[in-house]
Image (spheres, helix red, strand yellow):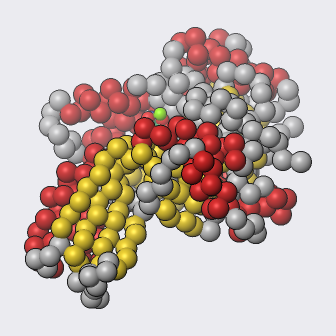
Amino acid sequence: MALIVQKYGGTSVGTIDRIRNVAARVKRTRDEGNQVAAVVSAMSGITDKLIGMAKEFGENPSEREMDVLLATGEQQSIALVSLALHELGVPALSVTGRQAGITTTGSHTRGRIDAIDPQFMKRSLEAGNALVVAGFQGITPDGLIHTLGRGGSDLTAIAVAAAVGADVCQILTDVDGVYTCDPRIVPNARKLPEISYDEMLELASSGAKVMQSRSVEFAKKYGVVFEVRSSLNDNPGTMVLEEHPDMENVVIRGVSIERSQARVTITGIPDEPGMSAKILCALGDAEINIDMIISNIASDGMARHSFTMHSNDLGKAQAALKPVLAEISGESKIETEAGIAKLSCVGIGMRSHSGVAATMFKALGEAGINIGMISTSEIKIAVTVDETRIEDAARAVHDAFELDKAPA
Ligand code: ASP
Ligand code: MG
């Protein structure tokens, strides 16, 4: 008998029929001789609807009240899934964040799980119940409700799996697993049997939105092995785990793209200490997330910096930089370019293989795609290209590394 934690997202519990499917799947898993704790999200659209209602009373509603409000979305689903299990004759208990013993720190709407006291969950499982646990919520030591940030039910599932000592943690979702690239863009993309935490994190931060990054970080920290798989079929999914030596045989695990990027270049910056800090602080204060950063010295001896960011932030960035530029030198100018996209190749095999960038750039060159900026980390190479060419770029690079073929 295994103890299995299953996480069902908003789409999987989005309608009454789908809730019945979830209940049937939980029942089947139990009938196979397992204990099951299902962590569920709010029905799809509910969290956004609640946020919309709150904003009827002002653009910046109290975060304390937002937590009280948003936590109700998950409470609806745990009760409904439990009722659906009762209909099938399964003894099931809904479990709120407080009952699950989930204590949080941090601030309202961005709570962090600090500890879980699994006594109640363990006792209830031992007594033969299926548990239906509310995702996305916990409670402060003072008894206030916290939510865990958008997509936070993934985090609840990973943390509950760690706390109850689950044998298996399944993230059941509307995709079949993690692919070498988005199959809507690269039709011969292949489902990966396994991927390391670090690769999953790099892909997630580069635009592949399978799971909330924080929950992958948490899984890595506590060594929770989990599987991303479909809630609609029984196909095996993708195991996410700590890397093992065999994994390095594969050079590139996957390719991801991120659209709607923009570049800002500042020229004519005096080549002196403290200049980059001034510029970056101004962007940071304006809460602009920058991604790639490149700086170099032009032939006139002045420095130039380029950054990429989401194109929605471009106006805000220009406004934030204007006073800084006036302050640092009369020579400084700002140039912007929107309509770019980022292509990232990720793989831990890069550490032990050479020529990865060469293969990637050659593939892009042969496809007639111009590379803008380049950035690298130990396990990632990313480039910007014209947004109109991003899908061609993904296909060219996917082909060049033969990602459609299973490694021997
Ligand atoms: N219901 C929350 C959200 O929509 C949490 C989750 O779905 O994971 O962000
Ligand atoms: Mg959701």
Q: Does 241 appear above or below 183?
A: below
Q: Does 366 appear above or below 134?
A: below
Left or right: 154, with 89 as reference point:
left
| Residue at x-position 27% and y-position 88% | 272
Left or right: 367, with 44 as reference point:
right
Q: Residue furthest bottom?
A: 273
Q: Does 222 appear above or below 339?
A: below
Q: Report if residue 263 is visible in the image.
A: yes
| Residue at x-position 60% and y-position 60% | 380
Left or right: 23, with 213 as reference point:
right
Counting from the top left corner in percent of width and height, residue 297 is at 34, 80
Q: Does 10 appear above or below 330?
A: above
Q: Report if residue 145 is visible in the image.
A: no
| Residue at x-position 70% and y-position 13% | 88
Q: Which quadrant of the figure has residue 372?
A: bottom left
Counting from the top left corner in percent of width and height, residue 339 is at 34, 44
Q: Nearer the viewer, residue 363 or 333?
A: 363
Counting from the top left corner in percent of width and height, residue 46 is at 39, 26
Counting from the top left corner in percent of width and height, residue 361 is at 59, 56
